[in-house]
Amino acid sequence: MIAAIVFGIALTALVSWYVVEPLLSPAEAVAEVENPPDLEERYRDALRAILDLEADYETGKLSRSDYESAVRRMKLRAAEILREMDSPENGLTASDDTGRIEP
């Protein structure tokens, strides 16, 4: 009888700790949040979307005006991502970048 009570208390304590522990350590919970897609992945997604729009237009699923509007938006999004990739905060820009390709 005493063994059953001790076992019940131990089990209750263990389950309580399992439930309460994530609430006591929010830093770990924040670290587990999925990271947003990186810039290169977002850029590839924008280019893929443009290709999909072209295919939809060629098969007649989109009207010309819908196609042009959607492609314009996706190109602007891709350009915005490229600007973000080139920003100094991302560490991807070289300080001596002249925009020229060396032979």
Image (cartoon, rainbow, N blue to C red):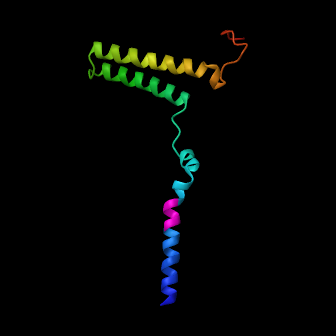
Where 98 sits versus 56, above or below? above
* Residue appearing at x 48%, y 84% in the figure: 5
* Residue appearing at x 68%, y 11% in the figure: 101
**Among the 4 quarters of the image, the one containing residue 51:** top left
Residue located farthest toward the bottom when viewing the structure as drawn: 1
Residues 95 and 3: in front is 3
Where 4 sits versus 52, above or below? below
Residues 101 and 70: in front is 70
Dividing the image into 4 quarters, which one contains the C terminus?
top right
**Among the 4 quarters of the image, the one containing residue 100:** top right
Q: Main secondary structure of the magenta part?
A: helix
* Residue appearing at x 65%, y 10% in the figure: 99
65 left or right, relative to 51: left
**Among the 4 quarters of the image, the one containing residue 93:** top right
Where 17 sits versus 57, above or below? below
Q: Which residues are magenta?
A: 16-20
Coordinates of residue 36 in the picture (x, y in percent): 51, 35
Coordinates of residue 28 in the picture (x, y in percent): 58, 50
